[in-house]
Image: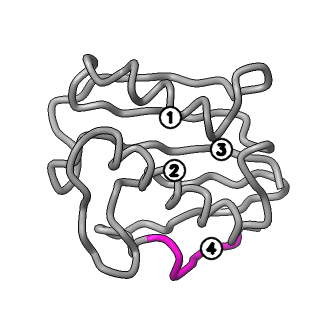
Amino acid sequence: MKKIIHTVNAPEPVGPYSQAVQAGNMLCCSGQIPIHPATGTIPDGIDAQTRQVLANLKAVLTAGGTNFENVVKTTVFLKDMNDFPVVNTIYAEAFGETAAPARSTIQVARLPKDVLVEIDAIAVV
């Protein structure tokens, strides 16, 4: 059976989807964009947006009973691949470099709310 995960510490979904869904011991987190959950604002710049995305993802993982250490796969969506070095540095702060999850990074034409970055994750609970 699946269990819907929701927390007020991450932004409300901008469409008909859940923040995360747990199935067995796997937690599938929807892509998080850099909306501040309390204010609804989006910070400027790739550095601040990446940090907010990771804060939102951490909140969803916590609500699902897990954390960054148990993430097995992420997908990073970038509006501009030139932002990859900045995102990579901040990502490494959250996940580390020696035991980081598997990851795909994709440049896309456009993201919801015209943000610069979105990250989804699959974790073990």
- Nearest-to-viewer mark from 1 and 3: 1
User: Which residue does the image show at 70% across and 30% down from the upper left?
Assistant: 96
What's drawn in magenta, residue-wise?
A: 2-10
Give how far across and how far down residue 69 sits, in percent. 79, 43
- Mark 3 surroundings within 10 Å by alpha-carbon count, few (fewer than 14), some (14 through 19), many (20 or more): many
Left or right: where 97 falls relative to 24:
left
Q: Quadrant of residue 118?
A: top left
Left or right: where 118 falls relative to 65:
left
- Nearest-to-viewer mark from 2 and 3: 2
Disc 2: which residue: 54
Secondary structure state at the residue bearing disc 1: helix
Which amino acid, mark 1?
Ile
User: Which residue does the image show at 51% across and 66% down from the upper left?
Assistant: 19
Disc 1: which residue: 90
Sequence-earlier tag: 2 or 3: 2
Give how far across and how far down residue 28 sits, in percent. 63, 52
